[in-house]
Image (spheres, rainbow, N blue to C red):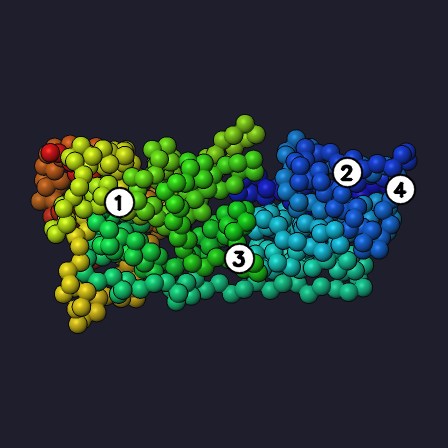
Amino acid sequence: MYSVLRSYGLNGLTGFAVAVEADISGGLPAFSLVGLPDSAVRESGDRVRAAVKNLGFQWPDRHITVNLAPADVRKTGPVYDLPLLLAVLTSSGQLEAPPQDTAFLGELALDGALRPVSGVLPMALAAAADGVRALYVPAENAAEAAEAGGDAMKVYPARTAREVVDALRGLSPIAPTVSIPFDPAESWNNAPDLADVMGQPLARRAMVIAAAGGHNVLLIGAPGTGKSMLARRLPGILPPLSREEAVETTKIYSIAGQLPKGRGLITHRPFRSPHHSASAASLAGGGANFRPGECSLADCGVLFLDELPEFSRESLEVLRQPLEDGQITVSRAAGSATYPSRFQLVAAMNPCKCGYYGHPTRACTCSPNAVRQYRSRVSGPLLDRIDLCVEMDPVAFDELHASSPAESSAALRQQVLKARQIQSRRYAAPGFEGVRCNAQLTAGQVRRICRMTPGAEQLLRASYDALGLSARAHDRILRVARTVADLAGKQLLDEDSVLEALQYRAQEKVDLTF
């Protein structure tokens, strides 16, 4: 007998339909699985055989052939265990064929229990788009799958394959999962507060500008000046995730297998802080199954690189494409996958190897050549993609014991949200598709948006020649100036806006002359 069930697989960030076909014919008992399966899929035959017997069903004592169509696309992971078991039961006459608008996902334990799998949200989104009305998934994956269903597709959580069989037979129906209400503002409740950072008014101002315009930041200072504290508090003043951003972020974490159990959509902006020993592959992503890397896991959030010069040159150069394009394409012999990587880069570094070059009270033990060599580990092209650079001085004793508290994240967040609302209205016009903040403006859009007063234009012209700015640096200065003007509620970029943007230039602060 022949049967076919619907399931889904993953190709990069998107799901695709897989038809699980089973045929039982005469001949010697055997189990054959075809359709370009990987090792995890091939091993599913043994798991399914044990689960069938332990659930009290009869394993067919004949020749079983299972095909995963389309046969020219590689199938990965244990997600096909459940539909494979049901296909065998249907072909052997132990179960009526499920409705055609029903799909199944899930890994089997040997006793028939269902274990969670990775990438359920993108597969559920594909199922909903294909007209699937009922989707059976492991109970721990139900919350994320329910976010894709809406009113058209019901998501049924199951803890064992027996529950699925009984539900299909009508013996014991499963209650569909209800999606969790989306409230991204709750992410601010657990975010560390900027009021904890004492002193550093210039760096605090830079973080507000970065949050308001989506700009990249480099913090330079001696150990203990508060670089890491500032970086970890940036998500607390960023605007909340939109539902579209939350779905995109959740898809990435679901594929990577890092979504918390029983969680629906991610509501907080990611904050990723890889160690400086991280390889280029761990930042970019890849591997046999094309897992997303740190660049993609930080999508819609913050990628914090502490001790920036300690990262290998190869790892840092990986950042250049995602910083410019907002996405990264991982290519291997088995194929390629493109993941979104629109993140804010926050980097921190010491001024030299010992950390005390230019310190007012502690002597630096590095030679001029050692300082130059340490700073040269950060390439010029990467610095050219950083909008804001701040040199942080040691915090004075009186600042640590000031009677008046520093501005809190809640107060600074209001400034950021006001500036983002201005940008949201501006970029709702035709010609700005995909632009959410000033940092995402293209070169052509910068010319349209960043109108200057005559004095500001003259100032930028003089700086362009004196500093030897590149065309990319010129546009980034205008983007930062646009954000400064938005925070001040100004329509045109005046001299103050351009001057403040120029003082954050990274190239001149990292390059040293002796």
Number of the front mark, 1 or 2 = 1
Label 3 residue SS = loop
- Which residue has dot 2 on it? 66
- The span from disc 3 to disc 1 (Cα, nearest Å) is 32 Å
Determine which residue is flagged by label 1. Answer: 349
Residue that appears at 57% across and 48% down:
119
Q: Residue at x 22, y 33 (%)?
A: 373
Amino acid type of the residue tagged 2 in the rendering: Val
Count of residue discs? 4
Question: Quick check: marks 3 and 2 in contact, CB under 8 Å?
Answer: no
- Label 2 close to label 4 by CB (< 8 Å): no
- 321 versus 423 height, above or below: above
| Label 1 to label 2: alpha-carbon separation | 56 Å
Q: Is residue 170 visible?
A: yes
Q: Residue at x 43, y 44 (%)?
A: 294
For this view, does 72 lie left or right of residue 254?
A: right
Q: Residues within 10 Å of mark 1 (few under 14, many from 20)?
A: many
Q: CA distance from mark 2 to mark 4?
A: 15 Å
* Earlier sequence position, callout 4 versus callout 1: 4
